[in-house]
Image: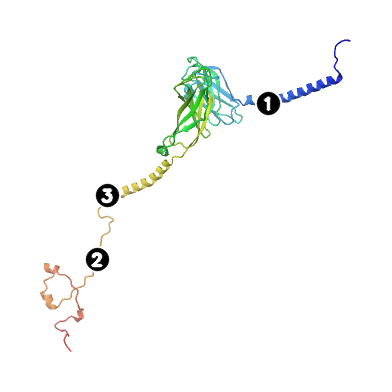
Amino acid sequence: MSGTIRPTPGTIKGSLRAAAVTLALFTALASALLPTATASAADKPTVTLSAPQAGKGGNITVTGKGWRPNALLMMLICGQSEPSRGVIGGTNSCANSDGRAVTTDAKGAFSKKMPVSEPPKPCPCVVHVATVTGQAAAEDTVFKVAGHPTAPLPDPAGGGRLGVLAATRLDGSSGVLTWFGAPPTRRLVFTVGNLGSAPVKDPVFQLGVSHGVFAPQWEDQQWHGTIEPGQKAEIKLDVQLAAGAHGDYQVAMKYGSKVLIEQPWGVGRPWGVTFFWILLCLVVPAAVFRIGMAVIDRVRPQGAGRHRTVRLSELTVKMPQFRTPKEQRQTPAASSPEATRTTTVLPWFTPDTAPSETHPTTKGNT
Protein backbone atom coordinates (compact mmCIF):
# COMPACT_ATOMS: atom_id res chain seq x y z
CA MET A 1 0.00 0.00 0.00
CA SER A 2 1.04 3.41 -0.76
CA GLY A 3 1.57 6.03 1.96
CA THR A 4 -0.58 8.65 0.18
CA ILE A 5 -3.33 10.14 2.35
CA ARG A 6 -6.52 10.87 0.52
CA PRO A 7 -8.73 13.66 1.89
CA THR A 8 -12.17 12.70 2.93
CA PRO A 9 -15.24 14.49 1.54
CA GLY A 10 -15.83 16.18 4.92
CA THR A 11 -12.34 17.64 5.01
CA ILE A 12 -12.72 19.11 1.50
CA LYS A 13 -16.05 20.72 2.37
CA GLY A 14 -14.55 22.26 5.53
CA SER A 15 -11.62 23.74 3.61
CA LEU A 16 -13.90 25.24 0.98
CA ARG A 17 -16.11 26.72 3.66
CA ALA A 18 -13.11 28.37 5.41
CA ALA A 19 -11.81 29.77 2.13
CA ALA A 20 -15.21 31.22 1.32
CA VAL A 21 -15.42 32.93 4.73
CA THR A 22 -11.90 34.37 4.35
CA LEU A 23 -12.69 35.69 0.88
CA ALA A 24 -15.87 37.34 2.16
CA LEU A 25 -13.97 39.03 4.97
CA PHE A 26 -11.34 40.40 2.60
CA THR A 27 -14.04 41.63 0.20
CA ALA A 28 -15.89 43.44 2.99
CA LEU A 29 -12.68 45.00 4.31
CA ALA A 30 -11.63 46.20 0.85
CA SER A 31 -15.07 47.69 0.17
CA ALA A 32 -14.91 49.56 3.48
CA LEU A 33 -11.41 50.96 2.97
CA LEU A 34 -11.56 51.79 -0.74
CA PRO A 35 -14.17 54.61 -0.57
CA THR A 36 -12.29 56.20 2.32
CA ALA A 37 -9.02 56.23 0.43
CA THR A 38 -10.75 57.57 -2.68
CA ALA A 39 -12.52 60.30 -0.69
CA SER A 40 -9.32 61.38 1.07
CA ALA A 41 -7.52 61.61 -2.27
CA ALA A 42 -10.39 63.59 -3.76
CA ASP A 43 -10.49 66.03 -0.82
CA LYS A 44 -6.89 67.13 -1.34
CA PRO A 45 -6.68 70.43 -3.27
CA THR A 46 -5.03 70.23 -6.67
CA VAL A 47 -3.65 72.89 -9.02
CA THR A 48 -2.86 72.49 -12.72
CA LEU A 49 -1.30 74.98 -15.14
CA SER A 50 -2.01 75.57 -18.80
CA ALA A 51 1.76 75.63 -19.54
CA PRO A 52 4.78 74.43 -17.52
CA GLN A 53 6.79 77.55 -18.41
CA ALA A 54 6.33 81.06 -19.80
CA GLY A 55 8.28 84.29 -20.08
CA LYS A 56 7.72 87.60 -18.37
CA GLY A 57 4.74 89.42 -19.85
CA GLY A 58 2.90 86.25 -20.85
CA ASN A 59 -0.17 84.66 -19.28
CA ILE A 60 -1.07 81.26 -17.89
CA THR A 61 -4.36 79.77 -16.79
CA VAL A 62 -4.46 78.26 -13.31
CA THR A 63 -7.10 75.60 -12.65
CA GLY A 64 -7.89 74.04 -9.31
CA LYS A 65 -10.16 71.36 -7.87
CA GLY A 66 -10.92 69.91 -4.45
CA TRP A 67 -10.85 73.25 -2.61
CA ARG A 68 -13.38 74.42 -0.07
CA PRO A 69 -16.55 75.74 -1.76
CA ASN A 70 -16.88 79.53 -2.04
CA ALA A 71 -13.38 80.07 -0.64
CA LEU A 72 -11.24 83.11 -1.45
CA LEU A 73 -7.81 82.05 -2.79
CA MET A 74 -4.59 83.89 -3.55
CA MET A 75 -2.37 82.97 -6.51
CA LEU A 76 1.30 83.99 -6.62
CA ILE A 77 4.43 83.13 -8.60
CA CYS A 78 7.19 82.50 -6.05
CA GLY A 79 10.91 81.93 -6.40
CA GLN A 80 13.27 79.90 -4.24
CA SER A 81 10.56 77.28 -3.79
CA GLU A 82 9.62 73.73 -4.56
CA PRO A 83 6.52 71.65 -3.67
CA SER A 84 8.41 69.41 -1.23
CA ARG A 85 9.83 72.31 0.81
CA GLY A 86 7.21 74.97 0.22
CA VAL A 87 7.89 78.66 -0.29
CA ILE A 88 11.20 79.35 1.46
CA GLY A 89 11.12 82.83 2.97
CA GLY A 90 7.34 83.18 2.82
CA THR A 91 5.61 85.62 0.51
CA ASN A 92 8.75 87.77 0.44
CA SER A 93 9.95 85.37 -2.26
CA CYS A 94 6.84 85.97 -4.41
CA ALA A 95 5.80 88.53 -7.01
CA ASN A 96 3.07 89.97 -4.79
CA SER A 97 2.21 92.95 -6.99
CA ASP A 98 1.16 90.69 -9.88
CA GLY A 99 -0.77 88.14 -7.83
CA ARG A 100 -4.41 87.37 -8.42
CA ALA A 101 -7.39 86.49 -6.24
CA VAL A 102 -10.06 83.98 -7.15
CA THR A 103 -13.15 82.52 -5.49
CA THR A 104 -14.03 78.86 -5.84
CA ASP A 105 -17.47 77.76 -6.97
CA ALA A 106 -19.96 75.59 -5.11
CA LYS A 107 -17.95 72.46 -6.03
CA GLY A 108 -14.60 73.86 -4.89
CA ALA A 109 -13.20 74.42 -8.38
CA PHE A 110 -11.81 77.51 -10.09
CA SER A 111 -10.08 78.66 -13.28
CA LYS A 112 -8.28 82.00 -13.52
CA LYS A 113 -5.80 83.62 -15.91
CA MET A 114 -2.81 85.37 -14.31
CA PRO A 115 0.17 87.28 -15.75
CA VAL A 116 3.68 85.89 -15.62
CA SER A 117 6.15 88.04 -13.71
CA GLU A 118 9.61 87.51 -12.27
CA PRO A 119 9.72 86.90 -8.50
CA PRO A 120 12.34 88.67 -6.34
CA LYS A 121 14.14 85.35 -5.68
CA PRO A 122 15.75 83.09 -8.31
CA CYS A 123 14.11 79.91 -9.51
CA PRO A 124 13.23 77.05 -8.98
CA CYS A 125 9.78 78.62 -8.97
CA VAL A 126 6.25 77.53 -8.19
CA VAL A 127 2.71 78.82 -8.56
CA HIS A 128 1.59 79.15 -4.96
CA VAL A 129 -2.17 78.95 -4.29
CA ALA A 130 -3.38 79.46 -0.70
CA THR A 131 -6.59 80.31 1.11
CA VAL A 132 -7.13 83.86 2.36
CA THR A 133 -10.11 83.22 4.65
CA GLY A 134 -11.17 80.29 6.78
CA GLN A 135 -9.16 77.13 7.33
CA ALA A 136 -5.62 77.36 5.98
CA ALA A 137 -4.82 75.31 2.87
CA ALA A 138 -2.08 75.71 0.26
CA GLU A 139 -0.78 73.95 -2.83
CA ASP A 140 2.40 74.54 -4.88
CA THR A 141 2.90 73.56 -8.52
CA VAL A 142 6.25 73.63 -10.33
CA PHE A 143 6.53 76.48 -12.85
CA LYS A 144 9.50 77.82 -14.81
CA VAL A 145 9.83 81.54 -15.57
CA ALA A 146 11.73 81.68 -18.85
CA GLY A 147 14.80 83.92 -18.68
CA HIS A 148 14.72 84.26 -14.88
CA PRO A 149 17.94 83.41 -12.96
CA THR A 150 18.20 80.01 -11.31
CA ALA A 151 20.05 79.16 -8.10
CA PRO A 152 20.15 76.13 -5.84
CA LEU A 153 17.89 76.15 -2.82
CA PRO A 154 19.48 76.96 0.53
CA ASP A 155 20.61 73.94 2.47
CA PRO A 156 18.08 72.68 4.96
CA ALA A 157 19.01 72.55 8.61
CA GLY A 158 20.88 69.23 8.17
CA GLY A 159 19.22 66.54 10.18
CA GLY A 160 17.95 69.01 12.76
CA ARG A 161 14.27 68.93 13.57
CA LEU A 162 12.56 71.25 16.05
CA GLY A 163 9.52 70.41 18.10
CA VAL A 164 7.57 72.24 20.81
CA LEU A 165 8.16 70.60 24.18
CA ALA A 166 6.14 72.68 26.66
CA ALA A 167 2.99 74.76 26.85
CA THR A 168 3.14 78.18 25.23
CA ARG A 169 2.09 81.50 26.73
CA LEU A 170 1.69 85.16 25.85
CA ASP A 171 3.55 87.49 28.19
CA GLY A 172 2.69 91.16 28.65
CA SER A 173 -0.32 93.29 29.47
CA SER A 174 -2.16 96.29 28.12
CA GLY A 175 -1.15 99.70 29.45
CA VAL A 176 -2.74 103.14 29.51
CA LEU A 177 -1.69 103.89 25.93
CA THR A 178 -3.33 100.69 24.71
CA TRP A 179 -6.54 101.83 26.44
CA PHE A 180 -6.37 104.90 24.20
CA GLY A 181 -5.79 102.94 20.96
CA ALA A 182 -2.05 102.17 20.94
CA PRO A 183 -1.06 98.89 19.19
CA PRO A 184 -1.41 95.92 21.58
CA THR A 185 1.83 93.97 21.98
CA ARG A 186 2.64 90.59 23.53
CA ARG A 187 5.59 88.20 23.63
CA LEU A 188 5.06 84.61 22.54
CA VAL A 189 7.13 82.34 24.79
CA PHE A 190 7.62 78.65 24.02
CA THR A 191 10.24 75.93 24.44
CA VAL A 192 11.55 73.90 21.52
CA GLY A 193 13.84 70.89 21.39
CA ASN A 194 16.07 69.58 18.65
CA LEU A 195 14.72 66.12 17.88
CA GLY A 196 17.11 65.54 14.96
CA SER A 197 20.72 64.45 14.65
CA ALA A 198 22.28 67.78 13.55
CA PRO A 199 22.41 71.21 15.20
CA VAL A 200 19.95 73.91 14.18
CA LYS A 201 21.55 77.35 13.85
CA ASP A 202 19.61 80.62 13.79
CA PRO A 203 16.21 79.09 12.99
CA VAL A 204 13.63 81.26 11.22
CA PHE A 205 10.09 81.07 12.59
CA GLN A 206 6.98 82.43 10.93
CA LEU A 207 4.41 84.27 13.05
CA GLY A 208 0.88 84.90 11.91
CA VAL A 209 -2.13 86.54 13.55
CA SER A 210 -5.66 85.78 12.37
CA HIS A 211 -8.91 87.50 13.28
CA GLY A 212 -12.38 86.16 12.53
CA VAL A 213 -12.58 84.29 9.24
CA PHE A 214 -9.34 85.72 7.83
CA ALA A 215 -6.30 83.49 7.47
CA PRO A 216 -3.05 84.60 9.15
CA GLN A 217 -0.54 86.76 7.31
CA TRP A 218 2.86 85.22 8.01
CA GLU A 219 5.90 87.26 9.04
CA ASP A 220 9.43 85.89 9.39
CA GLN A 221 11.28 86.26 12.71
CA GLN A 222 14.74 84.83 13.18
CA TRP A 223 15.99 83.55 16.52
CA HIS A 224 19.75 83.87 16.94
CA GLY A 225 21.42 80.89 18.53
CA THR A 226 22.27 77.24 18.03
CA ILE A 227 20.27 74.29 19.34
CA GLU A 228 22.33 71.13 19.56
CA PRO A 229 20.78 67.66 19.06
CA GLY A 230 18.89 66.62 22.16
CA GLN A 231 18.97 70.10 23.65
CA LYS A 232 16.11 72.55 24.19
CA ALA A 233 15.84 76.33 24.20
CA GLU A 234 13.27 78.93 25.24
CA ILE A 235 12.18 81.11 22.33
CA LYS A 236 10.63 84.58 22.75
CA LEU A 237 9.05 86.29 19.75
CA ASP A 238 7.29 89.67 19.78
CA VAL A 239 3.74 89.95 18.42
CA GLN A 240 2.06 93.29 17.65
CA LEU A 241 -1.40 94.14 16.33
CA ALA A 242 -2.63 97.21 14.53
CA ALA A 243 -3.61 100.37 16.41
CA GLY A 244 -7.11 100.18 17.87
CA ALA A 245 -7.37 96.40 17.41
CA HIS A 246 -9.82 94.58 19.68
CA GLY A 247 -11.63 91.25 19.75
CA ASP A 248 -10.58 87.60 19.60
CA TYR A 249 -7.31 86.87 17.78
CA GLN A 250 -5.33 83.68 17.09
CA VAL A 251 -1.53 83.73 17.19
CA ALA A 252 0.13 80.94 15.18
CA MET A 253 3.79 79.96 14.83
CA LYS A 254 5.07 77.94 11.90
CA TYR A 255 8.48 76.38 11.41
CA GLY A 256 9.19 75.19 7.91
CA SER A 257 5.84 74.16 6.46
CA LYS A 258 4.28 72.92 9.70
CA VAL A 259 2.22 74.95 12.19
CA LEU A 260 3.58 74.20 15.67
CA ILE A 261 1.65 76.66 17.88
CA GLU A 262 -1.84 78.17 17.91
CA GLN A 263 -2.47 80.47 20.88
CA PRO A 264 -5.70 82.47 21.46
CA TRP A 265 -5.44 86.15 22.36
CA GLY A 266 -8.39 88.23 23.58
CA VAL A 267 -7.88 91.98 23.18
CA GLY A 268 -10.12 94.39 25.07
CA ARG A 269 -11.84 97.36 23.46
CA PRO A 270 -9.95 100.70 23.76
CA TRP A 271 -12.59 102.52 25.80
CA GLY A 272 -10.30 105.53 26.20
CA VAL A 273 -10.89 106.38 22.54
CA THR A 274 -14.65 106.28 23.08
CA PHE A 275 -14.34 108.49 26.17
CA PHE A 276 -12.18 110.92 24.19
CA TRP A 277 -14.76 111.27 21.41
CA ILE A 278 -17.57 111.80 23.91
CA LEU A 279 -15.54 114.48 25.70
CA LEU A 280 -14.67 116.07 22.36
CA CYS A 281 -18.36 116.25 21.40
CA LEU A 282 -19.09 118.12 24.64
CA VAL A 283 -16.10 120.47 24.83
CA VAL A 284 -15.91 121.61 21.20
CA PRO A 285 -19.53 122.90 20.94
CA ALA A 286 -19.13 124.76 24.26
CA ALA A 287 -15.86 126.35 23.11
CA VAL A 288 -17.37 127.35 19.76
CA PHE A 289 -20.36 128.91 21.52
CA ARG A 290 -18.14 130.99 23.82
CA ILE A 291 -15.95 132.14 20.94
CA GLY A 292 -19.02 133.10 18.93
CA MET A 293 -20.49 135.13 21.78
CA ALA A 294 -17.15 136.92 22.28
CA VAL A 295 -17.03 137.83 18.57
CA ILE A 296 -20.61 139.10 18.64
CA ASP A 297 -19.91 141.32 21.69
CA ARG A 298 -16.86 142.77 19.93
CA VAL A 299 -18.39 143.52 16.51
CA ARG A 300 -21.85 144.89 17.47
CA PRO A 301 -22.30 148.71 17.96
CA GLN A 302 -21.94 150.28 21.40
CA GLY A 303 -25.22 150.36 23.30
CA ALA A 304 -27.07 148.23 20.75
CA GLY A 305 -29.23 145.68 22.35
CA ARG A 306 -28.63 146.99 25.87
CA HIS A 307 -31.43 148.04 28.25
CA ARG A 308 -31.30 151.54 29.70
CA THR A 309 -31.43 151.62 33.50
CA VAL A 310 -34.22 153.84 34.79
CA ARG A 311 -33.66 155.45 38.13
CA LEU A 312 -36.39 155.69 40.74
CA SER A 313 -36.00 159.47 40.96
CA GLU A 314 -36.98 159.82 37.29
CA LEU A 315 -40.26 158.06 37.96
CA THR A 316 -41.23 160.51 40.73
CA VAL A 317 -44.25 162.60 39.79
CA LYS A 318 -43.44 166.29 40.01
CA MET A 319 -46.36 168.23 41.46
CA PRO A 320 -46.74 171.96 40.66
CA GLN A 321 -45.82 174.36 43.48
CA PHE A 322 -48.47 176.77 44.82
CA ARG A 323 -47.19 180.20 45.63
CA THR A 324 -48.90 183.28 47.11
CA PRO A 325 -49.01 186.57 45.20
CA LYS A 326 -46.39 188.00 47.52
CA GLU A 327 -44.11 185.02 46.84
CA GLN A 328 -44.73 185.37 43.16
CA ARG A 329 -43.58 188.99 43.27
CA GLN A 330 -40.53 188.04 45.21
CA THR A 331 -39.68 185.10 42.93
CA PRO A 332 -37.25 185.94 40.12
CA ALA A 333 -38.30 185.57 36.50
CA ALA A 334 -38.50 182.09 35.09
CA SER A 335 -35.85 182.92 32.64
CA SER A 336 -33.32 183.85 35.30
CA PRO A 337 -30.74 181.23 36.39
CA GLU A 338 -32.14 181.31 39.90
CA ALA A 339 -35.52 180.16 38.62
CA THR A 340 -34.08 177.16 36.88
CA ARG A 341 -32.41 176.08 40.09
CA THR A 342 -35.63 176.29 42.17
CA THR A 343 -36.66 172.96 43.54
CA THR A 344 -40.25 171.90 43.70
CA VAL A 345 -41.67 171.42 47.18
CA LEU A 346 -44.98 169.78 47.77
CA PRO A 347 -47.46 172.06 49.64
CA TRP A 348 -48.80 171.09 52.99
CA PHE A 349 -52.28 172.27 52.06
CA THR A 350 -54.57 172.18 49.09
CA PRO A 351 -55.07 175.19 46.79
CA ASP A 352 -58.68 175.85 47.81
CA THR A 353 -57.71 176.35 51.45
CA ALA A 354 -54.65 178.53 50.82
CA PRO A 355 -54.77 181.97 52.55
CA SER A 356 -55.04 185.11 50.37
CA GLU A 357 -56.05 188.72 50.65
CA THR A 358 -59.66 187.95 49.79
CA HIS A 359 -59.73 184.75 51.77
CA PRO A 360 -57.94 185.29 55.07
CA THR A 361 -57.17 182.33 57.19
CA THR A 362 -59.74 181.18 59.63
CA LYS A 363 -57.19 180.09 62.16
CA GLY A 364 -58.05 181.58 65.52
CA ASN A 365 -61.57 182.68 64.43
CA THR A 366 -64.52 181.51 66.29
Select label 2 or label 1 by which is in front.
1
> In whole angstroms, how far apart are the C-alphas of marks 2 and 1?
111 Å
Height in image: 127 above or below 268? above
Q: Is 312 left, or right, of 245 in this rendering?
A: left
Looking at the image, residue 188 lies above or below residue 88: below
- The kind of secondary structure element at disc 1 is helix
Whether residue 95 is visible: no
Residue named by callout 2: 312
- Do residues under tags 2 and 1 come within 8 Å of each other at their CB atoms? no
In the picture provided, is 129 more to the left or to the right than 331?
Answer: right
Residue 247 image point, x, y percent: 49, 37
Q: Tag 2: Cα neighbours inside 10 Å, few (<14), some, or many (≥20)?
A: few
Instruction: Name the disc covering residue 298, or none.
Output: 3
- In the image, residue 67 sits, relative to residue 322, either above or below, namely above
Residue located beneath label 1 in the image: 35
Q: Residue at x 24, y 67 (%)?
A: 315
Of the pair 202 and 341, the residue shown nearer to us: 202
> Could you classify mark 3 by the number of other residues whose Cα lies within 10 Å: few (under 14), some (14-19), or many (20 or more)?
few
Label 2: element kind: helix
Which residue occupies the foreground of this view, 218 or 18? Answer: 18
Q: Amino acid at mark 2?
A: Leu
